[in-house]
Image (cartoon, grey):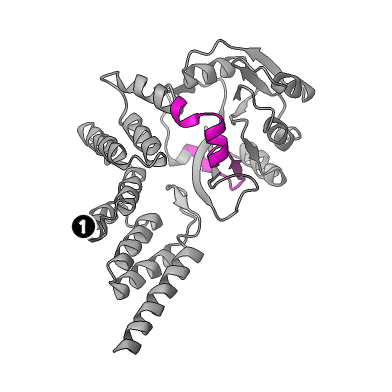
Amino acid sequence: MIVKNEEDFIVQCLESVQQFVQEIIIVDTGSTDQTIHLCQKYNASVFSYEWNHHFADARNYGLSKATGDWILWLDADEKLESTKAHSIQHAIQQTNAFMVYLPIINYHGESMPIQPDDAFIYYQPRLFRNHVGFKFIHRIHETLQPPPSLEISSQNIVSVDTEIYHFGYLKNITEKRNKSQRNLQALLKEYQDPSHSPWIDYHLASEFYRLKQYENAFTYLNESIIGFLQQGYTPPALLYRLKYAILYETGSFEIASFSIEKAILLYPDYVDLHFLKGLFLFQIKNYPAAIASFNKCLELGEHHKDYLITKGVGSFKAEQYKQLCINEMQASKKKD
């Protein structure tokens, strides 16, 4: 882990892994609270690191200190579902894979205590083999990169349904840490590099979306889409999810209800896109078509491991909006 002044969260994080891991590597970037002391209580090896505003560098420094055969990487404001840790142990004993994907439950909302239904679910490669050349890239929103000699395919990747709970997107926490400003500074610095990844544009769009600066968000989002296309890649589904979330927030319901079809053609099994389509149709009062979209959401469910999925869009939220459509149609018939 990389840490700085994490005394509010570090104990619950370390408690969740202490019976499961053989060593704990902490890269401290200048804590002035009790973080280091609390880490040492769990027999963690704590290494001081001069912060250079580059998360991948700090992550790679920690990686250089780790001796185990497998690396689990976390943030201090996360915790592992410790009751399911045996599933991970079983997986790494049985597999020839190089990476293990785990579901990250990202909670959002105002503050603790968390509301279980206010969450996004996304699988990430949080467990990987050490000593084979993996490293992290990107100044912020660091990404795990395999060595060029290692061909990663579905045959050497597995997923395990042991959740990691992330609390860092709760509003009071982001405001306390001035997280948006920190992230924007790092992202804009990376953006100045002409060869920057289109993911940087996407993350800028996400930050501006969270700040409700939708025009800026839409500009960077479109740059990201163009960037992926110029590199010969189909833009990832995440980009289209954010694009249509922005259009929803800006009230572009009618146009978006048609244009979202192009995104759905690319990702026909992405439940969030079908849910957004249903919302657009609901807003323009096309209730029968909206019901069809929400039925599709219920058919797809919300357990697809390739996508960031909003909790409820394949279950209770889709049911709720479907019922609202039915109510509106019944009310309209009574008026007639």
* Residue depicted at x 33% and y 67%: 282
x 65%, y 27%: residue: 6
Q: Which of the two residues, 162 or 36, is positioned nearer the viewer here?
A: 36
86 relative position to 118: left or right? right
Residue 313 in magenta stretch: no
Viewer-nearest residue: 184 or 41: 184
Task: Residue 12: name its quadrant.
Answer: top right
Query: Is residue 165 within the magenta segment?
Result: yes
Foreground of the two, 300 or 194: 194
Is residue 78 visible to us here?
A: yes
* Mark 1 nearby-residue class (10 Å; few <14, some 14–19, many ≥20): few
Can residue 315 be seen? no
The stretch of residues the image draws in magenta is 156-182
The amino acid type, in three-letter code, at marker 1 is Ile
Res 17 quadrant in image = top right
Task: Please give the name of the residue rendered at 63% of the width and 25% of the height, measured from the top-left corner.
Answer: 69
- Residue 318 coordinates in the image, percent (x, y): 44, 66
Find residue 152 and report its horizontal and vertical position in percent.
Answer: 43, 33
Q: Is residue 203 above or below residue 254?
A: above
Which residue is identified by label 1? Answer: 255
| Quadrant in which the N terminus is drawn | top right
Describe the element under mark 1 as helix, strand or loop.
helix
| Residue at the (59%, 40%) spot, across then down | 167
Judge from the rendering whether residue 336 lies leftward or rightward of residue 132; answer left or right: left
| Quadrant in the picture for the C terminus | bottom left
Residue 296, above or below 255: below
In the image shown, does 110 or 120 lie closer to the viewer? 110
Whether 251 is drawn above or below 217: the answer is: below
Q: What percent of the width, then of the height, locates residue 171?
A: 53, 41
Describe residue 10's horizontal placement relative to residue 178 as left or right. Answer: right
Q: How many callouts does the rendering have?
A: 1
